[in-house]
Image (tube, rainbow, N blue to C red):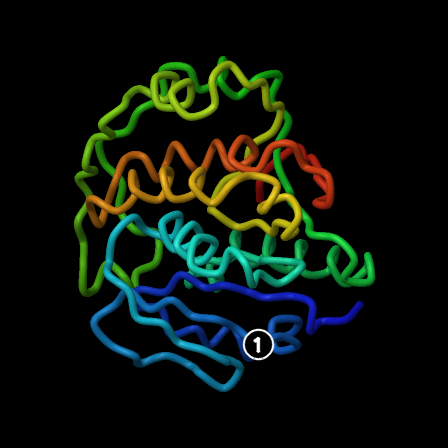
Amino acid sequence: MSVSNVDIIIARYNEDLHWTLESPFNEYQYIVYNKGPNEHFEKANVKKVINIKNVGRCDHTYLYHIVHNFNNLADINVFFPGSIQLSNKKNKAIDILNRIKNNDYKCAIFIGKYSKNILQEFNNFRMKNHQASDPQNTIINNESQLKPSILRPFKTWYTHHFGDLCVNFYTLFSIFSIHKNDIIQHDITRYQKLLYGLSLHSNPEVGHYFERAWGAVFHPFQFTKVFLVEKLY
């Protein structure tokens, strides 16, 4: 196996993506889904730019990629927001890439935090406001009010899609990788249905539900190694 077995998908709005020139990021080529009003970003290590509508934040981008490439996915799919230059996000992203490399590119890596049961832990979770963490994005769009999920709180949304499935880990910052086989074990209609819920607004509350439920989306993990950490960077 080699780096050619890996696709790294970036959800970009207004980030400059200069971090793609830094080590270890410069070892890879990137697919950029551009949701912003410009293409003023670093492209030296970008193999493809796809312009799509600005809805659903990065979570929408990831599912969009899965749905539109379902029969042609790379073995290892790495999903990054464009704001990886922020220190907490960068540390997590580097950890994921290093672990993939140390495993000879044979498996995807998902870094999460232990939870006895995410359905119970985030039972009544809901959010009203959230602003983009990257100042490059807030320069051109400082919206903070979230579009409420049609199904809320988290428990209502989760049980609608996943029933009482018990998953004991979650992640934050929407930074993770998934092996193709753990994606295609489910029918494409699963992802189309989930994608629809993220396609209705540029700042949806449901995106924060996904952030806590990616483990349920791809459950069970068979070809993706899960590493649990005390703190999510």
Q: Nearer the viewer, residue 83 or 158?
A: 158
Q: Quadrant of the N terminus?
A: bottom right
104 sits left or right of 91 in the view: right
Residue depicted at x 42% and y 18%: 159
Residue 119 percent across, percent down from the top left? 49, 17
Residue 150 falls in image quadrant: top left
In depth, the one of 21 and 198 nearer the eye is 198
Q: As drawn, is 57 to the left or to the right of 161?
A: left
Identify which residue, 44 or 77, lies in the foreground: 77
Q: Quadrant of residue 103?
A: bottom right
Q: Secondary structure at mark 1?
A: loop
Residue at 23% in and 36% down: 129
83 lies above or below 123: below
Image x and y of residue 128, in percent: 22, 30
Q: Quadrant of the C terminus?
A: top right
- Residue wearing tag 1: 29
